[in-house]
Amino acid sequence: MTHEMTTTEGFGADVPVHPRAYAPDLPVTGAWRPGDPTGNRRFVDVGGGRPFTLESGETLSQITMAYETWGELSPEADNAVLVCHALTGDSHVCGAAGSGHASEGWWNSVVGPGLGIDTDRHFVVCVNSLGSCQGSTGPASVDPATGRPYGSNFPTVTTRDIVRCQAAVADHLGIDRWLAVVGGSMGGMQVLEWGVMFPDRARCLAPIATTLAASAQQIAWSAVGRTALVLDPRFRGGDYYDAEKGDGPFAGLAVARSLAQITYRSVEVFDGRFRRELFDPRALYGKWDRFQVESYLDHHGEKLVRRFDANSYLVLNRVMDLHDLARDRGSMESAVRRLAHLPCLTLSISSDTLYPAKQQTELRDAVRLAGGRCDYHVIQSPDGHDGFLLAQHEVGAHLGGFLREVEDS
C-alpha cells in the first residue's frame, strides 16, 4: 500500500481520495441489482400494490423483499425459524460464497444440518432488511416515480418497519407463527420488536448481544462514522450511483467501517494480533500505514465497499440509533410485558464493550420482572461484539438446547 495523497479522475484532480491509497477498482456501490446473479435469493413484493406507510409517516410506493430459506416447512408450518441479520449482514446466513453471494454464510456453523439451528428439523428463513442493499428495497433500488435510484430520497426506516416487512414475507410463506425468532446486534433489535409487535406470531425469542434501547455511547460511535462517510466529497449528498468505478464514496464508507471495526473487537484482540508491528519497516517515519493494525482496518474497509452500499450503511446505522422498545409505548415495562409470555434466551459476549453484558442483563431482568422466562448465558470470547459471529460453536450450542426445550414443551 502506498503512502502518498491520491486523487481520482472524473471528480476532479484537486479532490483527494484519502491519505492512504485504496484499490483503484472499487465499485461505486456493492449493492445487488436486478440483472445480477440471484444466487439463492427469492423475492416477494410487499403491500399488495398499495403504498407502504413507514413509522415516520413517509411512504414507499413499492417494496420488494429478498430472502433465503433452508430446510423444509412442516405440513403444520410449525418448525419455521426466522434469523435476523446485523447491520452489514444479508440474507445469506448459510451456504458457500459463489455466484450471487460475495461471502459465505455468516452463521455457517450455527445454521445447517445437525447444527444449533438444525436445517434437518427446522425451516430457516433470513430476510434482507428493508433499507439494505442485497435484494430488498433500499437506497440503491430504482424509485418507480423517477426511474432512478432513490439515493438521497430514500426515507428513514425503523426496526418496526423492517419487522412489518418480515411479517409480510412470513405471510407469503404461509407461516402464521415462528417457532423462534433469532438474531444478534441489529438482528436482536428486530427479535425484540417481533415479541412486542406480534407476540402471538412466535413461540420463543433469542435476542443476542443486543439491547432494549440504543445507548448514548452507541449513538455517539454511529454518529461519528456516519459523519465521516458523508464528508467524502464523492458521496455527492447520497446521489453517486452514476459515477464511474473508482469515483464513488468508497473512502467515506471504508473509514466508517474502520471506526466501527475498532468498536467490534476488544483491546486483547488488537494487542494480541498486531501489537506495534509495522506494515513496512522501511516506512517507519512515513505519515501513513506505519502499523499492521492500520492496514487491517483498511482491508476491512475495502472489503465492505465491495459488497455494501454507502447509503444503506447510513440508513441501517440510523435504524440502530432509533431502536427503543419503549418509544410510544408508555414505558419500557409496558413494552416488555407484551413479550413476557414468550420464553427468551439472551447471550452476552464477555469482552463486548459496544453492547456490554449489562445491556443483556437488563433485558433478562426486565423480562423476569414482567413474569416471563429469560435464560441468560455469557460466552467467554476475546473477540468483542463480533464474538456473536465468531464464537459460533458456543452460540449454536446454546440456541440448540433452547430450541429443543421449547419444541418439547
Image (cartoon, helix red, strand yellow):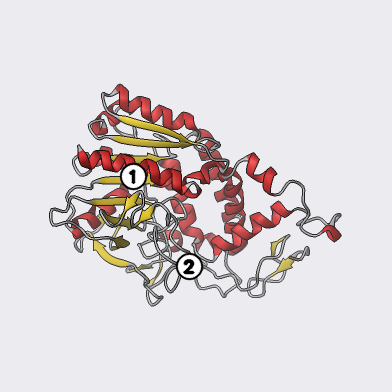
Regarding residue 55, the answer to whether it shows in the image is no
Give the total number of marks visible in the rendering: 2
Look at the image and tell me in which quarter the C terminus lies: top left
Q: Around disc 2, counting alpha carbons within 10 Å, would you say few (fewer than 14), some (14 to 19), or many (20 or more)? A: some
| Contact? badges 2 and 1 (CB < 8 Å) | no
Mark closer to the chain start, 2 or 1: 2
Of the residues shown, which amino acid type is indicated by label 1? Gly
- In the picture, measured across the screen, residue 214 lies left or right of residue 15, that is left
Residue at point 65%, 58% (across, down)? 298
- Percent across and percent down for residue 220 are 55, 39
**Residue topped by disc 1:** 400
Mark 1 burial class by Cα count in 10 Å: few <14, some 14-19, many 20+: some
**Residue nearest the viewer, comparing 279 with 29:** 279
Q: Residue furthest left?
A: 76
Residue 358 visible from this viewpoint: yes
The residue depicted at 51 percent of the width and 59 percent of the height is 310
Q: Residue furthest front?
A: 114
- Residue at the disc numbered 2: 102
Q: Position of residue 243 (x, y in %)?
A: 55, 73
Q: Is residue 28 above or below residue 76?
A: below
Along the horizontal axis of the image, is 327 left or right of 236?
left
